[in-house]
Amino acid sequence: MTEREVSLPLYVGLPHPCGYLEGREARMAFVPPELAVDRSLYTLLVANGFRRSGELVYRPHCPGCEACVPVRIPVRWFRPNRSQRRVARRNAHLTATVLPPVFRAEHYRLYTRYLDARHADGEMAGASPEDFMRFLGNQRWEGTRFVEFRADETLLAVAVVDELEDGLSAVYTFYEPSAEHLSLGTWAILWMVAEAGRRGQAHVYLGFWVRDCRKMAYKSGFRPLERLADGGWERLHPG
């Protein structure tokens, strides 16, 4: 591991179809569910390429494939490009409210509308309230937040964010399908960068970037971007 080393037992899951690259198999290594995880340990795990789904903390473990590259934005050096500056101006009127990770029917209704519009044939389609919280909620350790973005009283987006010791980790963002023109996914990341800077934190972790996966392409638009390599974190491309 990088940055600071830790020795942990890991379980390896069964092979399953890769969700990023068609025709490939994937496997995951994950932290045992019974292992105690606090914010300090979770920060260390994220800094070493782990992500979470619900309370399951995992990273890819695919023999012969290293396509999933953990990436993060160095907050101090980030400079928005022209398109991102337009998104910021377009959404400057939105209010952000940071909330604890508890079920809210309004969030769930927005989530189902988003899935119906964007991922109707995906594995999350038809998610129940329990599925919703199982995927996005977290009571295993302190630090998960649901960030609401509203125009007046209208809920437009929710970003699920994990608060780390050194920054923020973007878990998932869903938004009103009819407001797609606002680029709310991009706006959520811009908000996280600004919020991490306000807190004096160094990084916003964006999870995995896969070069040949079109739905991951937006991540490479945030520059400079750092990737986790064998020798530690390094610039993916110049700032």
Image: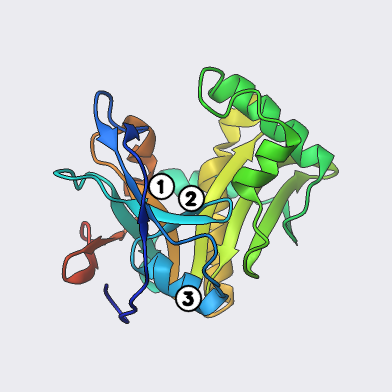
- Measuring 41% from the left and 47% from the top, which residue is drawn there? 82
Q: CA distance from mark 2 to mark 1?
A: 5 Å
Q: How is the image coloured?
A: rainbow
148 with respect to 86 (left or right)? right
Q: Which residue is mark 1?
A: 82
Q: Residue furthest left?
A: 64
Query: Looking at the rendering, in which quadrant would you find the C terminus?
Result: bottom left
Q: Which residue is mark 2?
A: 85
Quarter of the view holding residue 113: top right
From what the image shows, is residue 66 above or below residue 51? Answer: above
Q: Which residue is mark 3?
A: 41
Query: Looking at the rendering, in which quadrant would you find the N terminus?
Result: bottom left
From what the image shows, is residue 97 above or below residue 118? Answer: below
The type of residue carrying mark 1 is Arg
Q: Quick check: marks 3 and 2 in contact, CB under 8 Å?
A: no
Q: Residue 186 placed where, x, y %?
A: 50, 45
Say what secondary structure mark 1 lies in.
Answer: helix
Tell which circle, 1 or 3, labels the residue nearer the N-terminal end.
3
Q: Which mark is residue 189?
A: none
Instruction: Say which of marks 3 and 2 sits in front.
Output: 3
Quarter of the view holding residue 145: bottom right
The type of residue carrying mark 3 is Leu
Q: Residue 36 placed where, x, y %?
A: 55, 72
Tell which circle, 3 or 2, labels the residue nearer the N-terminal end.
3
206 with respect to 113 (left or right)? left
The type of residue carrying mark 2 is Arg
Q: Residue 229 placed where, x, y %?
A: 20, 63
From what the image shows, is residue 180 above or below residue 58? Answer: above
Q: Residue furthest right?
A: 153
Q: Residue 14 placed where, x, y %?
A: 35, 40
